């Protein structure tokens, strides 16, 4: 065995013991050898330089835009190529497999493209102009999948693919992300052909049956699926709901050591055959738990979703006070230069509140919930172990969430300016920006969709007619036009400076409670940017001591956004920021 193979074997031995590890390792080793022989070019991908300031990731459903007579993935590929091919580097296509519920996150078949969307050829069409990010929805699978049907029919292959719990088992310690039953009763056929009731583990819904990673055969199936995604050009793989993989009676069954070890194994597998492919973990949990998926900075996820950022940014704009956001940002640390944050503000889901617990006070969270409902959004609650309920998600479009519920009407200019200021905060932070389709293209909340489905998350999942979005993007009086042009400009300016490299140093400057102020530097420490974001509806005056910055009094500064030059006065830099104004001042 070489060193990497030995490390893979040790992971298997930790998970399954020596007896199971040996045959499992031999199967896995053959699988990896076969993959390498079929895709030798992937093993030559560089490990370093995977992302830079040139990178941002757009998050979109495969049918986000549609046109009569066209496969949705074809329409999406054509639309994105025409509008953002030279601006956005990567497209995260949300689950594009056949599914039975949850808008794609209850997968029926991991290995095929949903025929309603298109085929693998259409995925590759998007790949002609963009890198690709796929979802690996591998904590659970659809109740309509062949795997679960095989389990119900007592097929020996699938008999241990799912977690069966005996009636009366004490599960009181299990962490519950939602208010739904943890166990779902199903009818399984015995060898004699008789029906018998079984209780299967379902973390999220009765249609999403959790997979049993205690079974090494299941793990091997999942590894084969990951390798398929790599073969189909995925360069980033998002591990959905990965914190719940390993179940252990008598524990919370979240963030268990075995779960981390499975992710470490997946990392080693990909390093062995396609080292250029990155794992991104999606764990909607408090910050310290979330960043644990970096591992030691070399052995686990290369990126983690920065889940605390959306609620903290929203709080800053709601209160006109950036101090909590600034203190949190000042605490961010990367364990190595091999990893970075996946920064985002909006997604296909709502705005998670759990990641803000311990950072925002209960009163601040309650205020956010009340404001969301006052603005026409929704708040999702879960039941705690003691029977109480607590909010876990705000279901509202991010642009709408920034509004003032007391204002009867707001101008298009104000809405766009405030929204773009919030997005600039995300773009300026250390990491790679993840931008939701509806954010980039200036969508509002879809209340009619919530009425149609009865699900609060639908408010942020509208699918758009190609003709309508194209019309609005050409209309200089539309909100879409203002937001898209402004967002596009911000991304282009971000790309222009090496100080925005995802691993470039970051320092928070506590210059004013109403201004989120950040110093970003290039990895060679030669280029620096002072990023100033006014989170208030009032003008703010900021004074910065030059001696605290990597500049001199003679250093010429230029705002990347307006291209306006700035000069220092004596030993200070005095700046007046208009309401919701953003300045990115670059100097060398």
Image: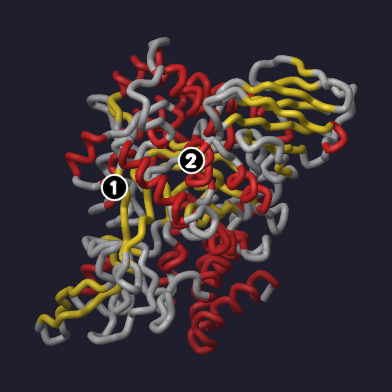
Per the image, label 2 sits on a secondary structure element best described as: helix
Q: Position of residue 22 (x, y in %)?
A: 53, 83
> From this viewpoint, is residue 131 visible?
no
Q: Which residue is mark 1?
A: 103
Which is more toward the observer, 28 or 178? 178
- Residue 49: image quadrant is top right
Q: Residue furthest top?
A: 476
Tell me the CA gap for discs 1 and 2: 26 Å
Which residue is at 59% across, 55% downward? 274
Q: Residues within 10 Å of mark 2 (few under 14, many from 20)?
A: many
Q: Position of residue 83 (x, y in %)?
A: 47, 22
Say above or below: 537 vs 146. above
- Residue 433: image quadrant is top right
On screen, residue 489 versus residue 194, left or right, reads: right
Say above or below: 238 vs 150. above
Q: Position of residue 474 (x, y in %)?
A: 40, 12
> From this viewpoint, is residue 588 visible?
yes
On screen, residue 567 versus residue 306, left or right, reads: right
Q: Which residue is mark 2?
A: 314
Which residue is at 42% across, 74% downward? 253
């Amino acid at each position: 065995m070489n060193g990497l193979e030995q490390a893979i074997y040790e992971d298997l031995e930790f998970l399954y013991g020596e007896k199971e590890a040996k045959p499992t390792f031999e199967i896995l080793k053959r699988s990896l050898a076969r993959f390498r022989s079929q895709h030798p070019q992937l093993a030559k991908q560089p490990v370093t330089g995977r992302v830079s300031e040139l990178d941002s990731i757009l998050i979109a459903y495969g049918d986000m835009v549609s046109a009569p007579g066209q496969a949705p993935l074809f329409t999406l590929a054509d639309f994105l190529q025409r509008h953002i091919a030279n601006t956005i580097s990567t497209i995260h296509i949300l689950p594009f497999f056949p599914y039975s519920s949850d808008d794609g996150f209850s997968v029926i078949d991991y290995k095929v493209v949903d025929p309603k969307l298109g085929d693998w050829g259409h995925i590759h069409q998007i790949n002609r102009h963009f890198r690709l990010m796929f979802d690996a929805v591998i904590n659970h699978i659809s109740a309509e999948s062949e795997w679960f049907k095989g389990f119900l029919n007592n097929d020996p292959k699938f008999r241990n693919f799912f977690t069966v719990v005996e009636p009366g088992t004490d599960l009181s310690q299990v962490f519950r992300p939602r208010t739904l039953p943890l166990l779902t009763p199903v009818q399984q056929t015995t060898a004699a052909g008789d029906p018998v009731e079984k209780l299967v583990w379902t973390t999220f819904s009765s249609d999403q049956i959790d997979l049993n990673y205690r079974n090494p055969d299941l793990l091997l199936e999942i590894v084969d699926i990951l390798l398929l995604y790599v073969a189909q050009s995925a360069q980033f793989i998002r591990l959905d709901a990965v914190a719940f993989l390993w179940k252990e009676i008598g524990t919370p069954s979240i963030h268990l050591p075995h779960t981390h070890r499975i992710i470490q194994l997946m990392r080693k597998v990909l390093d062995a055959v396609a080292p250029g492919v990155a794992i991104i973990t999606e764990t909607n949990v408090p910050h310290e738990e979330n960043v644990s998926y970096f591992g030691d900075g070399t052995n686990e996820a290369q990126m983690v979703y920065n889940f605390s950022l959306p609620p903290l940014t929203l709080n800053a704009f709601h209160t006109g006070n950036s101090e909590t956001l600034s203190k949190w940002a000042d605490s961010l640390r990367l364990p190595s230069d091999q990893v970075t944050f996946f920064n985002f503000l909006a997604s296909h889901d709502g705005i998670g509140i759990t990641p803000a617990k311990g950072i925002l006070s209960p009163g601040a969270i309650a205020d956010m919930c009340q404001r969301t409902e006052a603005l026409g959004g929704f708040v999702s609650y879960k039941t705690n172990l003691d029977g109480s309920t607590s909010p876990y998600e705000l279901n509202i479009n991010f642009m709408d969430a920034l509004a003032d519920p007391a204002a009867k009407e707001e101008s298009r200019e104000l809405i766009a300016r405030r929204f773009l200021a919030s997005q600039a905060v995300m773009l300026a932070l250390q990491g790679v920006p993840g931008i939701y389709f509806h954010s980039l293209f200036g969508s509002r909340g879809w209340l009619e969709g919530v009425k149609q489905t009865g699900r609060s998350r639908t408010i942020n999942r509208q699918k758009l007619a190609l003709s309508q979005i194209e019309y609005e993007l050409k209309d200089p009086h539309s909100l879409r036009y203002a937001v898209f042009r402004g967002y596009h400009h911000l991304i282009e300016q971000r790309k222009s400076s090496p100080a925005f490299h995802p691993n470039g140093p970051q320092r928070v400057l506590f210059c004013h409670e109403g201004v989120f102020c950040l110093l970003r530097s290039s990895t060679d420490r030669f280029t620096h940017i002072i990023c100033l974001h006014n989170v208030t509806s009032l003008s703010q005056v900021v004074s910065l001591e030059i001696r605290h910055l990597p500049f001199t009094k003679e250093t010429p500064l230029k705002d990347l956004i307006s291209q306006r030059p700035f000069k220092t006065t004596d030993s200070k830099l005095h700046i007046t920021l208009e309401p919701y104004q953003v300045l990115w001042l670059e100097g060398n």
